[in-house]
Amino acid sequence: MIDQIYPNIFRMEIPLPGNPLKAVNSYVIKGDQRFLIIDTGMNMSACREAMAAGLNELAVDLDKTDFFITHLHADHLGLVSELVRPAAKIYFNYPDADIMKDIHHWDEVKAAALTNGFSAEEVEYALQKHPGRKYFKPGPLNYTPLREADQISIGCYALRCVETPGHTPGHLCLYEAQEKIFFSGDHILEDITPNISMWADSGNPLQEYLDSLDKISRMEISRVFPGHRRIFADHRKRIAELKNHHQIRAEEIIAILKGGSRNAYQVASQMTWDIDCRSWEDFPAAQKWFASGEALSHLQYLRVKNKLRREVIKGKAYYSLV
């Protein structure tokens, strides 16, 4: 489905079969001499076919097209390797680009998952099913990295980069100050809550995410063009809802740990999730992975606030109330 959402700005819904997200929003901006595509979908046949049909309908010339990728997840970055042409620029961010270049990244993720409660068998199975590994074409891409306040000009639009770490370390949004429109990637979504996960021994992605929400709340925005689901207007109302969601999550984890120390996997198994499964054992591997990663980010957030302590016992990290 293609919608014209603003003068010379179009939204294509790129389907994600079998994925709870259902689709990713890919935006096309038509300029005088070139086109800009914001996010692409996964490297899978359904995405390739929908993208090809949409670009044909919009008469997009890929030889005159640049790309802006909000963050490293495969539903946003995965298809760009199939679309990019020699003269194209792929605008990206520095932190996520560094992760993409890190040949040890998945080994480190695997080690963190084992430390935080996954069995070796479950880790192997979850990583086999992980969309970030299945639907991304390996091989180096020539990125043009951008930082806060860098600008992309396309047609009548001057798009300013806004760093919003949290969902990924380098998540980058675009803001058009004159029109007050905001391409939010997965930083702010209206109908679903962005997953804030971590698989590391250090860092605090949830705090970074909350700080990024506060940063965006201070901006004047008339329309938010998100990475998934519908376009919306009242960004401050949605930000308040997202912050409240994570506060409730943190309180739920504290209540769970009143029953004794647990690792992130165990905590996730007792949390409330909006998924149609009778029990934790019935969760698909990918959903266990994202749930446990989100549990860990909240545990780390509470630990930094001195609400929890962390202790490693026989190679497993356990959290308990202070």
Image (cartoon, rainbow, N blue to C red):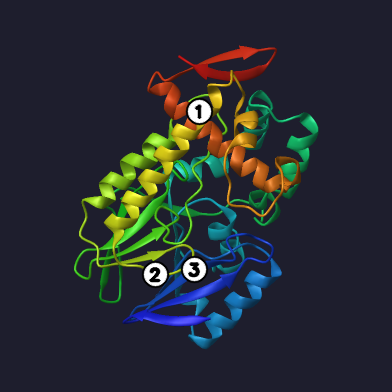
Q: Residue shown at 60%/59% (left/top)?
A: 78
Of mark 2 and mark 3, the one earlier in the sequence is 3
Mark 1: amino acid: Ala
Residue situated in front as seen by the camera: 251 or 71: 251
Horizontal and vertical percent position of residue 47: 63, 70
Question: Measured along the vertical axis of the image, is residue 171 above or below residue 157?
Answer: above
Q: Residue shown at 27%/45% (left/top)?
A: 214
Callout 3–callout 1 Cβ contact below 8 Å: no
Q: Residue shown at 39%/52% (left/top)?
A: 172
Q: Which mark is residue 303?
A: none
Horizontal and vertical percent position of residue 73: 55, 52
Q: Compute the Cα span from label 2 to label 3.
A: 10 Å
For mark 1, give the secondary structure.
Answer: helix
Pointer 3 residue: 25
Quadrant containing the C terminus in the rendered view:
top left
Q: Alpha-carbon neighbours of circle 3 within 10 Å: few (<14), some, or many (≥20)?
A: many
Q: Compute the Cα span from label 3 to label 1.
A: 37 Å
Pointer 2 residue: 231
Of mark 3 and mark 1, the one earlier in the sequence is 3
Q: Quadrant of residue 201?
A: top right
